[in-house]
Amino acid sequence: MPILTIAVDCMGGDFGPSVTIPAIKTILSSRPNADISNDPVYFQLFGDQNVIEQHLLQHKLNGHKCLEIFPSKDDVLMTDKPSLALKKKKQSSMRLALESVRDGRANACVSAGNTGALMAISRYVLKMLPGIDRPAIISALPTNENGPVYLLDLGANVDCNEQRLAQFAIMGNELCKGLDGIQSPKVGLLNVGEEEIKGSERLRKAAELIKQLDGVNYCGFVEANHIFRGDYQVVVTDGFTGNSVLKASEGLSLFLLAKIKYAFQKNWWTRFIGLLAKPVMNFFKEEINPERYNGACLIGLRGIVIKSHGSANTNATVCAIEEAILQSKQKVPSKIRQRLEMANKKQVF
Amino acid sequence: MPILTIAVDCMGGDFGPSVTIPAIKTILSSRPNADISNDPVYFQLFGDQNVIEQHLLQHKLNGHKCLEIFPSKDDVLMTDKPSLALKKKKQSSMRLALESVRDGRANACVSAGNTGALMAISRYVLKMLPGIDRPAIISALPTNENGPVYLLDLGANVDCNEQRLAQFAIMGNELCKGLDGIQSPKVGLLNVGEEEIKGSERLRKAAELIKQLDGVNYCGFVEANHIFRGDYQVVVTDGFTGNSVLKASEGLSLFLLAKIKYAFQKNWWTRFIGLLAKPVMNFFKEEINPERYNGACLIGLRGIVIKSHGSANTNATVCAIEEAILQSKQKVPSKIRQRLEMANKKQVF
């Protein structure tokens, strides 16, 4: 394996190679001397050979020495059931890309395909880290402070006992340290109130477990209105609540943007002000642009798997691939593994 | 009891009588001939007699025939533990106001006091409707459509089994019908996806129970990004997730408003545009103003209890009291009781 290799499922998501290939071009262009620099990245392109070749030609990338096509014979569809994708689509671009990570030919896999299928196939192909049952989904959200906050789980584990929540704390902590270079991220556990007596027994037990973890700066219960304040760098919760918080935030953002638009459409004068304010509003939208936070990670696996949003455009896909590169450099799974072993030795779980 | 009587805990919340008395004045002013009109409302004012009299004098309400002071000897503090408030503060304005509802002297109670204490004392004094264990907290949220969406539970019941979730569906349905006059509100159950196979077993069981309820227009699982779209009028979830969705929405709103402000502060030109756009932004803020949605209801009790936000100002308090008036007119608890009895007869629970 060359120094850094990313396996890209080119066919996944709503736009397939028409966003994955331009995204890869952007990344290659930002590393003009990749093959001789200190920061070379190679891409394995999984998908329909003809289609990928067409897109490479169109973007003048054909024959690029940092790219290699790996033909697949099937596609995982967005509508496929995970169990069907796992059993029947053994030659899909998603499966082959994950196998490349498993076999040590690539450092990480990026896919915008069917989340359930990606979860199931990742778990089967890559296997879980010792002591972890299922991957969790983690992603960064913007905050009022400089850095983002990492929220997990975002929907992979709808029921979580206290052990699993404590494992999320370890995983979120190591990911945040690796990606953002923060020595000791503040880790919080989502609850209905900050006081230690609040919430379900499961949450209070989870708090006790997380307190015992070495190298985790546990800062107590956190209420959801504090997530976006940036007081914490990692917020742990179960997959149902995390998914609901994330999706409610997406829904509310759209609702508020529609309300602002409506306010500027009231009459000719407000429309004129709206025209003047357009650059300001564009700057605002760029500041909160979800594209910048594209690239959720399936964490807890023995390899790195980045899930790009199904509707991700080129810029968003660049962010997802850059995250795969960064996680590969930081060797996040092996760091999580070490921390899990320490917790197991201490019999925290 | 005169035709409609509201028991107001004048001392609760951050501002006590300095917001409750002006709010009552606003409501009385909007009903100038209350004593002879078809819409008379009487207020029982619970709290420190001297303090209330001072505020009445200040607002020229002393001796108003629609007002009566009921002196209390104690206050429930925001920091009091619910158990302490329940056991030790038997002469508090909160307790006496609730007892007035229990004894049939008032139709509803409004308090901005300590939520936990209000829950505990309401449950003890008013008792639950048959078959309900604990009150749920329900509130309206704005949507892109004309009407609001009612979300419950917002934090009273962190652990909910399928029976409790089905009871929430009944309660939310009757409240929405009563307050918004919607014949057949669309009721959804919050989940990580819309497909019937999604989510925990508990949610799938709850869906089966809700389907069996007469008079509930159950429309399936709903994802949190759809809450603010207005596709549903009632969204049911457990108290932990509902609380997290509500608080995350509050936090995100503040975050986005701060980002807009920042965008307008970039340089002298954007500040100038910001000045011009101020009326538009004020209109936008008014559109999403949380004051308009103040007044959560503790539902499932044998009486009407409206919880005003601790930091509610006069306008927000007016909304909470108006909600108490509307719920009293609609006799929401007795409608919920009927529906619960029908479900019990059908052995849904």
Image (cartoon, coloured by chain):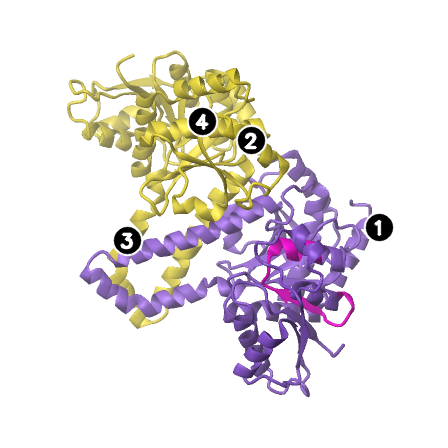
Chain colours: A purple, B yellow
- The tag earlier along the polypeptide, 3 or 4, is 4
Q: Which residues are magenta?
A: A102-121
- The tag earlier along the polypeptide, 2 or 4, is 4
Query: Does dot 1 land on a helix, a strand or a loop?
Result: helix
Q: Chain of mark 3?
A: B
Residue A65 point in image, percent of width and height: 66, 85
Please name the residue shown 47% across and 30% down the image: B169
Q: Nearer the viewer, mark 3 or mark 4?
A: 4
Query: Does dot 4 land on a helix, a strand or a loop?
Result: helix
Crowd around label 1: few <14 · some 14–19 · many ≥20 (10 Å): few
Do the residues indicated by labels 3 and 4 lie within the same chain of the protein? yes
- Which residue is tagged 3? B282
Q: CA distance from mark 1 to mark 3?
A: 58 Å
- Which residue is tagged 4? B171
Do the residues indicated by labels 2 and 4 lie within the same chain of the protein? yes
- The tag earlier along the polypeptide, 3 or 2, is 2
Residue A253 falls in which quadrant of the image? bottom left
Please name the residue shown 64% across and 68% down the image: A324
- Residue type at the position of mark 4: Met
Do the residues indicated by labels 1 and 3 lie within the same chain of the protein? no
Contact between labelled residues 2 and 1, with CB atoms less than 8 Å apart? no
- Which residue is tagged 2? B208
- Residue type at the position of mark 2: Glu
